[in-house]
Image: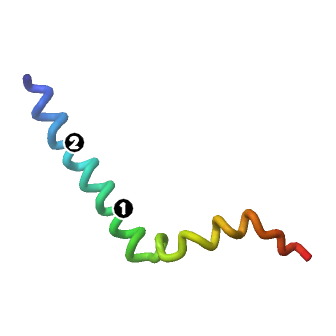
Amino acid sequence: MSILFLIIPLAFLLAGGAIAAFIYAVRQGQFDDLDTPAHRVVVDDDG
């Protein structure tokens, strides 16, 4: 039973870290253009 006092706060810390990382990525513009990288693989512009 005492392990729950360790696991539950640890789970909240990990979830909070994941949410903070996601918010940071959104603010930095990591999800602005999701289509161009997929098209870049198909189109060969090496010349």
Extreme residue in the top direction: 1
Residue at screen point 78% across, 69% down? 43
Q: In the rendered view, does 9 fall on the left or right side of 46?
A: left
Nearer to the camera, 40 or 9: 40
Q: CA distance from mark 1 to mark 2?
A: 16 Å
Q: Residue 6's x, y, as percent?
A: 16, 34
Label 1: how many residues lie within 10 Å, few (<14), some (14-19) or many (20+)? few
Extreme residue in the right direction: 47
Q: In the rendered view, does 5 fall on the left or right side of 11?
A: left
Please identify the quarter of the rendering in which residue 46 is found. Answer: bottom right
> Disc 2 on helix, strand or loop?
helix
Residue 32 is tagged as: none
Residue at screen point 64% across, 68% down? 37
Q: In the rendered view, does 45 fall on the left or right side of 23?
A: right
Q: How many numbered callouts?
A: 2
Nearer to the camera, 4 or 46: 46
Residue at screen point 12% across, 30% down? 4
Nearer to the camera, 35 or 32: 35
Q: Amino acid at mark 2?
A: Leu
> Disc 1 on helix, strand or loop?
helix
**N-term mark: 1 or 2:** 2
Q: Residue 2's x, y, as percent?
A: 9, 26
Q: Residue 11's x, y, as percent?
A: 22, 42
| Quadrant in which the N terminus appears | top left
Nearer to the camera, 23 or 10: 23
| Quadrant in which the C terminus appears | bottom right
Q: Which residue is mark 2?
A: 10
Please identify the quarter of the rendering in which residue 34 is found. Answer: bottom right
Q: Which residue is mark 1?
A: 21
Q: Amino acid at mark 1?
A: Ala
